[in-house]
Amino acid sequence: MAKVYPEIPEETQKKIKELSLLLSGAKTVEGRAKENRIEVEEALALLIECDEEAQRSVVVGDYKVTVKRGLSYKVDAVSIRKLCLEHSTNVLLKSSVTWSLDVAGYKSVKKDDPEFFAFLTQHVEVKPKKTAVTVKFGEEK
């Protein structure tokens, strides 16, 4: 059941509007700064040559500029695995197992078995995530 919150006072609403406007402006400036940063990085990368999977540093005056290039690989693992099996090799694939907490299960243990949960909590670090704030204006709502 969703928590019911009290009505927001008018003074608080006014402050929310002011802060929302500031946040919107900050995000606009941030977006422009990011676009500018990317343009500058690309211009520097054009001036400093290096192989596609390498890095190169140059010192110009008081500045040390490093360009690092790399490639990312996306694979159809099922097809590659089939081809490897047909060619009696497995050198193209690595496998890994990642363990993660089933948060819903963890929370249900808290409710259903508090004694076991007390033991579990010694082995689980819980930290708050970064709070997300989204502001939409006018027709965006």
Image (tube, rainbow, N blue to C red):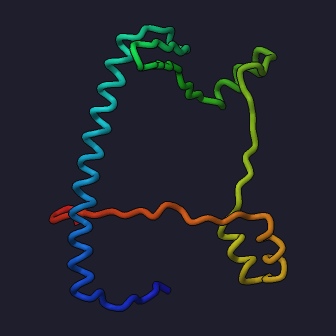
**Residue drawn at x 54%, y 25% as measured from the top left:** 72
| Vertical order, 119 against 67 (above or below) | below
Residue 63 placement (x, y as % from top left)? 42, 20
**Residue drawn at x 84%, y 77% as measured from the top left:** 116
Give the side of residue 139 with respect to residue 51, left or right.
left
Give the side of residue 120 with respect to residue 65, left or right.
right
Task: Looking at this view, name the residue that lies furthest to the left.
Answer: 138
Give the side of residue 107 with respect to residue 140, left or right.
right
Residue 73 placement (x, y as % from top left)? 56, 25
Q: Considering the image in quadrants, where does the C terminus appear?
A: bottom left
Q: Which of the two residues, 126 or 105, is positioned nearer the viewer here?
A: 126
Residue 136 placement (x, y as % from top left)? 24, 63
**Residue drawn at x 24%, y 80% as measured from the top left:** 13
Quarter where residue 85 is shown: top right
Residue 1 placement (x, y as % from top left)? 50, 86
| Vertical order, 113 against 58 (above or below) | below
Q: What is the tally of numbered marks visible in this picture? A: 0
Task: Looking at this view, name the residue that lies furthest to the front.
Answer: 62
Quarter where residue 4 is shown: bottom left
Q: Which of the two residues, 73 or 41, is positioned nearer the viewer here?
A: 41
Quarter where residue 25 is shown: bottom left
Give the side of residue 33 with respect to residue 70, left or right.
left
